[in-house]
Amino acid sequence: MKNLFIFIAIMCILGSCKEEELRVEDLIANKYWHVESATIIESTEFLEVDAYGSLYDYFFEECERDDAIFFQMAGYEEAYKPVIIDHGAIKCCSLEEEQTDIDYTWSLSDDKVLWLTNSYGRGTMFIITFIDSKSLWLETCQITDLSNPKTYIITYKYKL
């Protein structure tokens, strides 16, 4: 009987030590994410890149590579929360460029789909293919030309 009591006490202690599983929203929000890479699966004449090529140099100018994206959650109860773009130390336009922009909102659906919506109401859907406390991988599908449609998938990898 005494051994049973000790066993139950140990199980209660160990059971209370389990880490609480974080929600996807908690992993994404209130952190500054920096683009680490951008790749494409299918080549297109429109983008002039090779199949499975890197888009990092093509999409991001030198002045954009130190930018960070911040998915704000604190203080916002509504479904669409602000996305803050921090332009980093190197400015693209001029020294008078604002340090931050809030032109987008974000929302999650099913913890796997991230929606970014611009100030004009146009949204882009991203599939979360990987996430942990220091990495975020997003995929999106784009069509280059409606008269001769080619679909390609772009993967963005972010890090803290």
Image: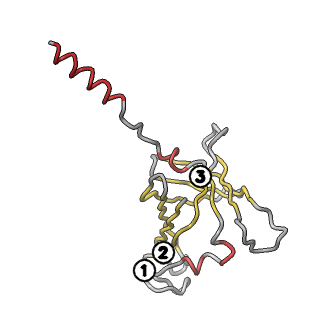
Task: Please state which of residues 34 and 5 is positioned toward the viewer in this rendering.
Answer: 5
Local secondary structure at mark 2 = strand
Tell me which residue sits at (55%, 76%) in the image: 56
Report x, y in % for residue 110: 45, 46
Mark 3: give few (<14), some (14-19) or many (20+) Cα within 10 Å.
some
Tell me which residue sits at (46%, 81%) in the image: 53
Give the spatial CA distance, label 2 vs label 1.
7 Å
Q: Earlier in the sequence, mark 2 or mark 1?
A: 2
Report x, y in % for residue 124: 57, 60
Report x, y in % for residue 96: 85, 68
Quadrant, the N terminus:
top left
Disc nearest the viewer among 3 and 2: 3
The image shows residue 119, relative to residue 80, as above or below, that is below
Mark 1: give few (<14), some (14-19) or many (20+) Cα within 10 Å.
few
Local secondary structure at mark 3 = loop
Report x, y in % for residue 153: 46, 71
Q: Which mark is residue 17?
A: none
Give the spatial CA distance, label 3 vs label 2.
23 Å
Q: Earlier in the sequence, mark 3 or mark 1?
A: 3
Circle 2 residue: 39
Circle 3 residue: 31
Circle 1 residue: 52
